[in-house]
Image: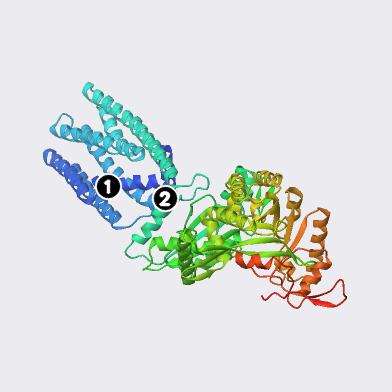
Amino acid sequence: MRLAKAISRFAERLNGSVPDPVLHFELVRALYGATSTAKPLFIATAAATAVTAVAALLSSDLAFALIAVLFLLTGIARSVAASLYHRVEHDPFDNADLRRWEMIALAGAWSFSGLVGVAGAYAVSNHPGTDVEILISCCVIGYVAGVSSRNASRPLVTIGQVSFTCLPFTVALLLRGDVAHLVLAIFIGTLYVGTIVICRSVFENLVSRHQAFRRIETLAQRDVLTGLWNRAAFLSLLEAKFASPARDEVGLIAIDLDRFKDINDTLGHPIGDAVLKEAAERIRSALCPGDEVSRVGGDEFLVMLAGPRAKDMGAVSRSILAKFSDPFAIEMTRSICGASIGCAIAGRECSMDALLRNADLALYEAKRRGRSQVVEFTVELSLEYESRVALEHDLQRALGRGELDIVYQPIVDPRSGRAICCEALLRWNHPELGSIAPDVFIPIAETTGLIVPIGSWVLTKACTEATHWSADIKLSVNLSAVQFRHGREIVRRVRAALAESGLPPSRLDLEITESVLFEDNAATLGILEELRSMKIGISLDDFGTGFASLGYLNDFPFSKIKIDRKFSQKVSESSRTSAIVAGTAQIARDLRMECIAEGVESEVQLERLRSYGINAIQGYLFSKPLPAHKLRKLIQEPIFPASYKVAARATGKVATRRKLAL
């Protein structure tokens, strides 16, 4: 063992730059390459044995016969080793196995070279001036020249071979002392030194070229930031798994970082890059050797589990999710960045494209459910996806086919029953599926960008309809966050709708939710201020359901706030909810904003809200959303809930106001 370690250390010093595992594997394999298989080795052994046997016959010297036998035994041993090497599969990263086979090849090559050198030295010393000396010397010189060119890329092999050959032969030449032998000794010595210098230079050039190739290969297949597989390389690995005729199940885990955009935007790209690097390490720490992981996008990762590991997909996904429970501590900052994970498994009948789609569907569902969770693909998800795609396709043609319509729900002052505003609400009457709920098709319209042309149509048509109402009734239209992504284009569209319809700007209210304010506060603020300068009202919808509504009230020019229905409907049941609503109403009064309560469905809720000074009420208690022609009739008279009675002002009698059939 000590001898082997010593030889190994010596070999590393001779080789200079220690090659990487892949290069090392290729160099060792070259020792057993085309010229080192059983057949070429047998030919070389036969030639050496024949030459020494001829020398023995010419000189009647049994020493040459002994050397011939040793050549034969060495050749047989090398042929057996080469045959065994080619019958066994080798791991490029098994360093111990590589070293073992390398030492076997070196021992065989050096033994053969040593016998050549001994034969040459013996011929010069004991048979000078004879045909035997000429025969053997020519063979020695030819052998040195041959190994110098054949193994020039491996200094260790070449130096060992020429050393074991040249040293004893050169010593014998020097001991002869005559001019001819001295000149030959100098020639052999020069050839020896030149061989060492050349083979070292060739080897270093080979290593540098290999390293350059590896760098290029890394840039082509690896993500520069994290060192993981890039998308193209990962998909090639996945494709190879599916192309295998004997493939087992393949599991795919899709990972998307939560809140990464916020970290990148607020803390800067260097911090974002550091988070991505640590995220990659956290994912890797949850995997086993043989699992493959890739960064396929900005903050998206894919993990492949093959064979028996595919059955552990759920457990591995949960383990990865757990790795993101701790904050990311980067340069004195602690950032919370969770992960949404979707996973799917492919059996023998599943295609690669289907697996990628299934994992993506599961990831989408994980994000839809609220993020920071694991969702495994099911058939139900696929059916939902197909239904969504079909709706998306139909929605693209719905506007042109006249399937979209607008209904209006009045906002009422309960003190007088007067409609003070009507909110335009979009509806879709599908020719086959009937009425499609807004919370189903609106997200599809926003995702596809269809909300922009649809929103423009709604704005223009609703403004036109509002011109048929009393001049003191306003119109309220909802705007999507997607419409604000086009910058001042939304201002142009509003101006165009007002100009086409003839509706005064002061009669238009635009409702937005906090999602509009998330993306670019400065740009959004500029747009809202421009709209307010036109005397258009701006309402903050769904107040109280977001993260920073009070901050938005301070920073943006809102004229109204709408209390979300979840507060209105619990105001009579929960003291905590009542306190929140009362506080909101007080804030609105202090900021001189109108406060509207939506989703009011009972007289008990109405009375509680009125007690807080809220006198703008929207909900089924007064009216459900109605088509335009029905709304026109409704808003011509005061609107009161069914069974709602008020005292007559003049006579003191009880007059029953008009009942609204809901």
652 relative to 293, above or below: below
Q: Position of residue 654 (x, y in %)?
A: 83, 78
Instruction: Give the residue type that dot 2 points to.
Output: Ala
Disc ID at residue 232: 2
Taking the image as shown, residue 511 lies to the left or right of residue 172, namely: right
Furthest-top residue in this view:
179
Left or right: 220 as drawn, with respect to 532: left
| Between marks 2 and 1 in the image, the one whose residue lies nearer the viewer | 2
In the image, residue 573 lies at what x, y percent? 78, 74
Q: Which residue is mark 1?
A: 33
Amino acid of disc 1:
Gly
Question: Who is closer to the viewer here, 36 or 20?
Answer: 20
| 576 to the left or right of 122 | right
Under circle 2, the secondary element is: helix
Image coordinates of residue 495 in percent, x first then y, are 62, 46
For the point 31% across and 64% down, the residue is 245
Residue 432: % across, % down: 46, 70
